[in-house]
Amino acid sequence: MRGADAQGRHRDHGSARRGAAVALAAAGALVLAGCTTGDAQQVVGQGYVAGDGSLVQLAPEDRGDPVELAGTTLDGEQVDVADWRGAPVVLNTWFAACGPCREEAPDLVEVATATAGDGVNFLGINVSDGPAQGTAFEEQFGVPYPSLEDRDGKGVLALRGQLPPASTPTTLVLDPQGRVAARFSGAVQDPSTLRAVIDDAAAEGA
């Protein structure tokens, strides 16, 4: 009987181990999917996962303080968004291996080019790449605006507030006073929507 009991316990333990292994494998598959699919990009060391492109806008009376964001670009230049007060500013978090970032890049380039004559400034915030990798991305997509090199996370940290970036990519539109007026969580789905949000912000400062 003792042998039978031991054999039964051995089978039970084996089943438990197999069940745990299956659970771990399933969890690992989910994590892997989250790191490689366009719907769930994850930034190493940052903990972001991509959003669904949803848009949130704040009425002027609901906005917080102006964003204080400055740093060094991938090209080694110094930039400070406070220098761009008086017109809308568009901030976009990204990294080169991010699928949704690559998908939206042509749309961002299109809108940035179309609004540059109106004084609108775009600034990327690269959350994980070194200058060489980030610059290669910019050259591939013809990005006409600078990007902060933000591997230390200080740039993203400066954006905490009512609508902080919670995904990569995230696009924030600042009003002419430098306050966050709108947030796209995830890739911008339609460049005309981004253009409309920028136009709305510009009209506030007219």
Image (tube, rainbow, N blue to C red):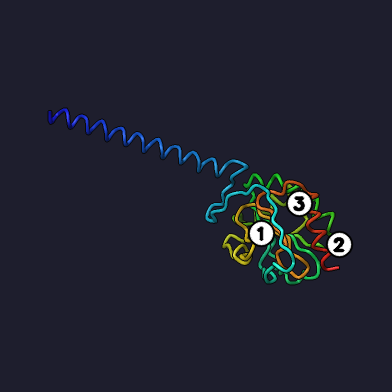
Q: Earlier in the sequence, mark 2 or mark 1?
A: 2
In the image, residue 25 above or below residue 170: above
| Amino acid found under the numbered disc labelled 1 | Ile
Q: Nearer the viewer, mark 2 or mark 1?
A: 2
Q: At which x and y percent is residue 58?
A: 71, 62
In the image, residue 15 above or below residue 150: above
Q: Which residue is mark 2?
A: 118
Q: CA distance from mark 2 to mark 1?
A: 22 Å
Check whether the beta carbons of the residues at disc 3 and disc 1 lie within 8 A of each other.
no
Q: Quadrant of the N terminus?
A: top left
Q: CA distance from mark 3 to mark 1?
A: 13 Å
Q: CA distance from mark 2 to mark 3?
A: 16 Å
Locate residue 198: give its quadrant.
bottom right
Secondary element type, mark 3: helix
Q: Which residue is mark 3?
A: 108
The mark found on residue 125 in the picture is 1
Locate residue 115: give its quadrant.
bottom right
Q: Earlier in the sequence, mark 2 or mark 3?
A: 3
Judge by depth and name the residue closer to the eye, 92 or 132.
92
Residue 113 is left or right of residue 93, and the answer is: right
| Amino acid found under the numbered disc labelled 2 | Asp
Residue 200 is left or right of residue 148, and the answer is: right
Residue at image coords 66%, 67%: 71
Q: At which x and y percent is residue 185?
A: 66, 52
Residue at image coords 72%, 58%: 57
Q: At which x and y percent is residue 95?
A: 63, 52
Check whether the beta carbons of the residues at disc 2 and disc 3 lie within 8 A of each other.
no
